[in-house]
Structures are given as C-alpha cells and as structure tokens.
Image: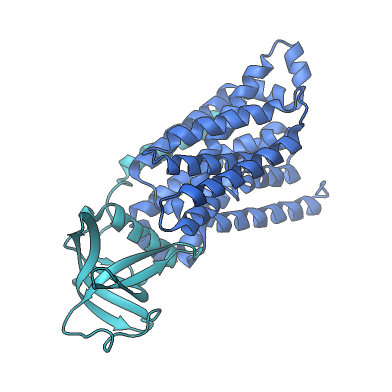
Chain colours: A blue, B cyan
Amino acid sequence: MIETLGMYFQFPFVRYALIVGVLIALCSSLLGVTLVLRRFSFIGDGLSHVAFGALAVAGILNLTDDMLFVLPVTVLAAVLLLRTGQNTKIKGDAAIAMISVSALAIGYLLMNLFSTSTNLSGDVCSTLFGSTSILTLTQGEVWLCAVLSIAVVALFILFYNKLFAVTFDEDFARASGTRVEAYNLLIAVVIAVIIVLAMNLVGSLLISALIIFPAMSAMRIFRSFRAVTLCSGVLSVVCALLGILISIVSGTPVGSTIVAVNMAAFLLCCGAARIQGGKA
Amino acid sequence: MKRKTFAALLLLASLLAADASALSLFGKAPEKEEGVDLDLSQLSGTVVYSQVYNMMVTPQDYVGKTIRISGLYDVYEDAGTGNTYFACIIPDATACCAQGIEFLWAGEHTYPDDYPEPGCEMTMTGRFETYEEDGAEYIRLADAEVEWGEID
C-alpha cells in the first residue's frame, strides 16, 4: 500500500491536490462552526451556486482569469445573504434558496445559450461535482490557494474573540461596543473566498458538506466553542486527506469520496457520543 | 492559550505551503526505466485522466518521451478533409468528461480491416509529439505499439 501511494506521490499534481485539499478543508471547517451555530448551514450551497453562475458568465466573456470575476460576485452575494437576517423582508433561508436556484438556473441557461465549449455537459458536470479539478491545478493556482488559505486562518486567529461574540449573541456584542456589521462583512468575505476555493475540491454541489459535517461531527463530542472548532479542523483535514488518497488509489470521484468519508466520520462521532452517554 | 493553539494551526498551514518548495513538491515526476519514460497503464483512472490533462496543457514537458497508457479505442473521420484519426480515450471518474490521445499505430495497418470496433480496450506505448493542423496544435503518440483488449 505504501509502495502504491509512493508511486502516486511521484506525480506533482497529486501532491498539489493534497496540499490544497488540506488547506481548503482547514479553512472551511473553521468557518463552518460559526455558520452552523448561526443557522447558516446552507449558505455554502447558496454561494457555491452563485459562484457557478458567475463562472458561467466569466466563461462566456472569455475572461482569462475567471477568479477576478467570480470572487467579487460571490463576496457580494455573501454580504447580501448575511444581511438578510437583519430587518429585511425576505428572511435567511428563503433568501438563500432564492439566490441559490436563481444563480444555478441562470448560469446553466447562459452556458447553454452562449457557451463556445464543445463539451458543455462535461463543463457543467465538472463545475458541479468537482470532477478532477483538484488534480488539474497549476502551480500558480496552488500558491494562490495557499496564500488565501493562510490569510483566512490568520484572520480567524486575529478576530477569534470577536467572531465568538458575534456568533453567539449579536445584540450583546453590539451593546459591548463590537462593530457587528464590520465582522459580519468579514465573515461574508471569508466565506466567499472559501467557497470559491472549495469549488476546485468538491464542486459546487458538495461544498456544504465541507462546512457542515466537520462542525456537526465535532459538536457530537465536544461542547465548548474552542474544542468544537479545533476538533472540526482536525476532522476536516483528516477526512479530506483520506478522501483524496482513496479516490486517487481506487479511481473514484474526488469530491464525493471526501463527502463520503465525512459522513462516515459523522456516524463514528455519533456512535462515540452515544457510548459516552452524550447528546447524539 | 487559545491564541497559541490557533497559532500552531497557522504555523502548520504555513509549513505546508513552505514545504511545497523545500521538498521539491513542484518537481516533475521521476522517469521510468526499460524504455518507457512514463507508464500510466497501472494507475487509477482518476490519476491517468489528470495526467493526460496535464499533457494537453503543457505538451512541451513531454515531447520526445515514451509513454505507455491504457484506455478505450475510438476513431474520428473528418468528413471535410477525409482524414481519419485514431485515439485512446480516458474517461474521468464521474464519466462526464474524457481526454483522448491520438496515436499513430506503428507498422502497416489498414483501416478498418486491422482495427477493432470503437470502445475496445487498448494499451499503447509510443513517442509523445506535437503537430500543427489548420493553425492549431495537437498532441499524439507516434510509432505506437498497440495491444488490444484488457492488459494486466
């Protein structure tokens, strides 16, 4: 087995995939805890569909670097979605659902009407399910991902206390002088960055799993915010590594294999919690 | 304490990125012996698909190398020019995308008499080269030795 893995590690793109996979998994799990606790579990799904729509537009416009278009559009959508909890007529879950399906439909419609690609179904499938995107990264994309991931982790560390306060009680945080709107904006930007990065790993349909599963698994076992966040990070990284390695060796799709490993980890955590007499 | 723990996480992420260059993670795959520079016939479909994608994106890295690869045989006849192109198709794991490498079978062979039905499994070993046609660059394996049917 070690010999087989060694053979695969000879390929640079396999090593790129592992590096990027670990970094994305770490970032998504850190923010995942905050999102799950704020009842925004499904925001990843909504934003990834927005990113899909933006990607379709970028493709039609023949933009050489689609990230320059996709990232700002996703950030904008994230800001709008996180604002929906605050004095808006359309509330959180409905707004996410509306934006999600609208972006998906418009993106697919535009791709069908204007795409110059000879393999439209392949392009759509690859974007939705990740396909082998994580295994076809260029060196530049790996560095970009590394820089963005480190920035996300650094922001999380720097503003950990404020994020904690905003996550659990916005009103109290505001009353104690915390600039809640600014931190919500920060969360929105970071989520959008993670979503755009994670599209390479698992595709836009499966991104929610990276955000929800590690946090929910950790919550089966731990109760404090810090312990849940740490456990979530470790679980997410381990599951991503295992998923990528299994898919490389057995030839299964990368994204769905990672999600399947996350599901297995969740069930294990539920079992462990039951044995401990916990809350699962 | 909290900050120290998270600082450790940040350090880990930084080290991963730094190791990318320190451990030559951005190097090329080592070459194989016995006349084959790159043997893809024993690898999983996911990795083969990705490797072929890389060959198409950066063909200059592979020109002149002897490559062995397995896939499904397919043929394309260009009605406009009358040319016939033979290819080895490698589908991805989700089966929604496929990469193909054109090949020139070594020796004298007549189409369609000497060729199997499209979809037949094949393994070929040939020299990687690029060529231009109508202003576009294409890749193919020249002087390819072809084995038809599933190869262990």
Residue A237 position within the rendered picture, expressed as x and y whole percent measured from the top left: 55, 46
Can residue A114 be seen here? yes
Say which of A213 and B62 sits in front.
B62
Figure check: B88 above or below A204:
below
Q: Which residue ends up furthest to the front in the rendered image? A: B80
Name the spot of residue A90 as percent of width and height, x first. Answer: 76, 31
- Quick one: which residue is furthest to the bottom in this view? B113
Q: Position of residue A23 (x, y in %)?
A: 49, 41
The residue lying at 26 percent from left, 58 percent from top is: B30
Is residue A228 visible from the viewing direction of this image? Answer: no
Which of the pair B64/B17 is nearer the observer? Answer: B64
Answer above or below: position of A37 versus A117.
above
User: Hey, which quadrant is residue A61 in on the image?
Assistant: top left
Look at 49% across and 63% down and name the residue there: B96
Residue A215 position by quadrant: top right
The answer to which quarter of the image holds residue A53 is top right
Name the foreground residue: A246 vs A252: A252
Quadrant of the frame with the C terminus of chain B:
bottom left
State how many labels appear.
0
- Judge left or right: residue B37 versus residue A174: left
Q: Residue at the location (45% across, 49% down)?
A: A115
From the image, which quarter does the N terminus of chain B lie in?
top right
Eyeballing the image, is A165 above or below A10? Answer: above
Task: State the image coordinates of residue B43 (x, y, percent, origin top left).
Answer: 38, 68
